Image (spheres, rainbow, N blue to C red):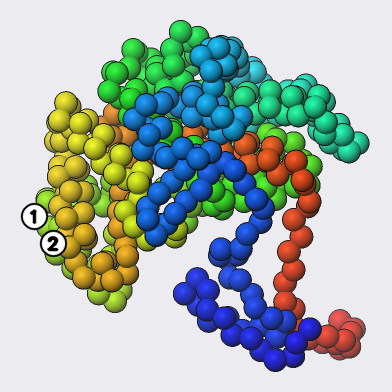
């Protein structure tokens, strides 16, 4: 151990450590090799399994993208038919899980989502069987097949948990899933109890595709850490939900929409953006990204969808108009140009949700409905060469203090 303090700059802070460099927040620390997704932040490119997000958003569906992420290849027609059939049969929840959601109906839906995922795992015999095999050190072909079966269940059930909580929180009867509807259409049907508008279905499907994976942000890393102990898949996903619940990870699209409503007028955009450049000024929600130093490719896609959505249904609160005005000012302001700060997907995605009637508190749960496939895919990938995570900390406290009896303190 070096006695000389080492200064490093990470995360905007100067840290000192007598032990050596400390990577604050594990920023840019590599934890594994992956073939699931890749990001070129300087050029604004996102790939899933080698396919650009723009191509997938234009031509694909969430079912197909989730298969790609989980199984590493685009499905054949037969592959996709079988996958969709399995997913649709696995949508509903156990009665015990429904009771958990009912008991948490007045809680924030992220608490209910976390608890319901754990509850499904507690009653899933496949989950117990796999957990026992992992405990005994077995992870061969049979166990891997079981792991993928459980992963599919999690992807299928996540929308049902969110929709059931929405219904129960409003003292409405739950709407059972339908096997004749797509993943996204069924989700909207379970939430609102009516045939969804095709454009709204397209918007949900786009959102789910755009957020299906994004390398290793906090929630995905959390899933890795829990799974590395050989805990079960449901528990690892529940932990990922807990990480996503934190405002530094989830909720930016909610805050963006709230800010547009507060601004209220596109003509105020110039003053708002200028104020954001001043010390202590307001933060522009949805502008800037930890990885992207160019325009987020997902933001471009959802900007165009939001434009189509308000063209069909109107923009009575001026949300799209305000966002467009703010974006124009940001893209042409030297402060943001020099710092390479651009709108990200959260800047645009909440607008359509708001006009669909989705309450703010369900914005982040819908993110989990999308990202669950990335979480489980990363877990299964990591289990191929598992090693429990065990980082170290640099101790900077005293040693060998003398114990003083309580009477003498």
Q: Residue at x 39, y 18 (%)?
A: 185
Label 1: which secondary element: helix
Q: Residue at x 34, y 30 (%)?
A: 58
Viewport quadrant of the N terminus: bottom right
The furthest residue to the bottom: 4
Q: How many marks?
A: 2
Examine the rendering and report whether any part of residue 350 can be seen: no
Label 2: which secondary element: helix
Residue 135, image quadrant: top right
Residue 89 screen position, x and y as percent: 59, 12
Q: Residues within 10 Å of mark 1 (few under 14, many from 20)?
A: few
Q: Nearer the viewer, residue 9 or 73?
A: 73
Direction from residue 43 to residue 176 in the image, left or right? right
Residue 64 screen position, x and y as percent: 49, 24
Q: Nearer the viewer, residue 156 or 56?
A: 56
Residue 122, image quadrant: top right
In the depicted structure, whether residue 301 falls above or below residue 11 = above
> Residue 267, labelled with which disc?
1
Residue 109 screen position, x and y as percent: 49, 36
How far is mark 1 from mark 2, CA to CA?
A: 7 Å
Q: Nearer the viewer, residue 65 or 77?
A: 77
Residue 288 screen position, x and y as percent: 35, 59
Direction from residue 111 to residue 195 in the image, left or right? left
Q: Residues within 10 Å of mark 2 (few under 14, many from 20)?
A: some
The furthest residue to the top: 180
Instruction: Check whether the beta carbons of the residues at disc 1 and disc 2 lie within 8 A of each other.
Output: yes
Q: Which residue is mark 2?
A: 270
């Amino acid at each position: 151990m070096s006695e000389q303090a080492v200064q490093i700059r990470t995360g905007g802070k100067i840290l000192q450590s007598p032990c050596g460099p400390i990577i604050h927040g594990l920023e840019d620390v590599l934890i594994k090799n992956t073939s699931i997704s890749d990001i070129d932040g300087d050029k604004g490119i996102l790939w899933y399994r080698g396919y650009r997000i723009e191509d997938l958003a234009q031509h694909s569906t969430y079912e197909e993208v989730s298969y790609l992420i989980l199984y590493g290849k685009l499905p054949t027609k037969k592959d996709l038919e079988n996958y969709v059939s399995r997913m649709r049969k696995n949508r509903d929840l156990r009665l015990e899980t429904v009771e958990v959601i009912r008991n948490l109906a007045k809680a924030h839906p992220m608490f209910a989502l976390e608890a319901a995922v754990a509850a499904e795992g507690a009653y899933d015999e496949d989950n117990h069987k796999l957990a026992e095999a992992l405990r005994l050190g077995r992870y061969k072909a049979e166990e891997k097949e079981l792991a993928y079966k459980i992963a599919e269940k999690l992807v299928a059930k996540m929308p049902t948990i969110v929709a059931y909580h929405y219904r129960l929180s409003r003292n409405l009867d739950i709407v059972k899933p339908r096997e004749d509807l797509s993943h996204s259409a069924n989700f909207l049907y379970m939430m609102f109890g009516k045939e969804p508008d095709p454009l709204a279905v397209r918007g949900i499907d786009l959102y789910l595709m755009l957020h299906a994976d994004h390398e290793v942000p906090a929630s995905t890393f959390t899933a890795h850490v829990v799974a590395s102990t050989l805990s079960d898949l449901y528990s690892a996903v529940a932990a990922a939900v807990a990480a996503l619940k934190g405002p530094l990870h989830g909720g930016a699209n909610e805050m963006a929409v709230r800010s547009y409503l507060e601004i209220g007028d596109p003509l105020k955009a110039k003053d708002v953006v200028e104020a954001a450049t001043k010390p202590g000024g307001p933060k522009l929600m949805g502008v800037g990204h930890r990885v992207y130093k160019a325009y987020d490719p997902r933001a471009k896609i959802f900007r165009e969808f939001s434009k189509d959505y308000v063209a069909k249904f109107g923009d009575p609160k001026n949300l799209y108009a305000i966002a467009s005005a703010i974006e124009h000012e940001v893209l042409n302001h030297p402060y943001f140009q020099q710092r390479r700060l651009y709108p990200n997907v959260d800047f645009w995605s909440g607008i359509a949700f708001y006009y669909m009637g989705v309450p703010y508190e369900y914005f982040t749960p819908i993110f989990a409905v999308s990202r669950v496939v990335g979480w489980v895919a990363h877990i299964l990938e990591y289990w191929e060469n598992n090693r429990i995570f065990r980082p170290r900390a640099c101790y900077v406290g005293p040693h060998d203090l003398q114990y003083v009896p309580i009477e003498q303190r």
